[in-house]
Amino acid sequence: MMAQFAAFWGLGGVVLLLASAVFRLTPLAIQAFSDKYEWSLYHWVTLVMLTLFMAYVEGYRAFQLGFSPRVAARARYLRGHRSLLHTVLAPLFCMAFYHAPKKRQITSISVTAGIIVLVVLVRFIPQPWRGIIDGSVVVGLTWGLVSLVIFGYQAITEERFDHSPEVSEENNKA
């Protein structure tokens, strides 16, 4: 029972984190389209190009091909490896902040730190440019959120799930 809870808490925590970002950024993206801001052709071209770029790089490559299947696989891993620590920190476990190979941990923490820095920097960009950036990020995050829900469902319900949780052998003994 605790292992099932850990898997759902891990997936649910990551889904809530992504959904929170989408819901916080969407109004800022929409605000850029208000009558307060005048749009030129270069704004529209930037919006289209950046949105396509973020859909491919963030949504498809980063989330669908990497993050989402790994998070789902790590949630699945929790079902068979009971631990109070893993249960309590399941979302952090699923994002590979701990109990993962060093390279994966460093990558996960570095990417998260980089995202935090970018979020802080984008706050200083005036509209409509901030809305253009936020809107394209919302597209990538939404793609990631949908892929995470799909992979999560597959990981929890299907007999086989052919994605690695990236848990090193030495960590399996812990």
Image (cartoon, rainbow, N blue to C red):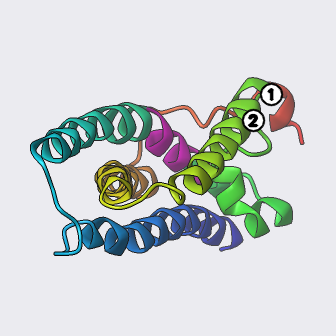
Query: Would residue 169 be counted in the magenta stretch?
Result: no
Residue 80 position, x and y percent, is 67, 52
Residue 94 position, x and y percent, is 63, 51
Q: Residue at x 35, y 32 (%)?
A: 57
Any part of residue 161 in sight: no
Q: Residue at x 86, y 28 (%)?
A: 170
Residue 70 position, x and y percent, is 53, 40
| Proximity of marks 2 and 1: CB atoms separated by less than 8 Å | yes
The part of the chain drawn in magenta is 66-75
Q: Which quadrant is the C terminus positioned in?
A: top right
Q: Which residue is mark 2?
A: 105
Q: Residue furthest left?
A: 41
The residues bearing labels 2 and 1 have C-alpha atoms spaced at a distance of 5 Å
Residue 114 position, x and y percent, is 64, 41
Query: Would residue 68 be counted in the magenta stretch?
Result: yes
Report the amino acid beneath label 2. Gln
Q: Which residue is mark 1?
A: 102
Mark 1 Cα-neighbour bin, 10 Å: few <14, some 14–19, many ≥20: some
Q: Residue at x 48, y 72 (%)?
A: 20
Q: Is residue 153 above or below residue 170?
A: below
Mark 2 Cα-neighbour bin, 10 Å: few <14, some 14–19, many ≥20: some
Task: Name the residue nearer the viewer: 98 or 61.
Answer: 61
Looking at the image, residue 168 sits to the left or right of residue 114; the answer is right
Q: Residue at x 54, y 66 (%)?
A: 17
Report the amino acid beneath label 1. Lys
Secondary structure beneath label 2: helix
Any part of residue 148 in sight: yes
Looking at the image, residue 13 sits to the left or right of residue 86; the answer is left
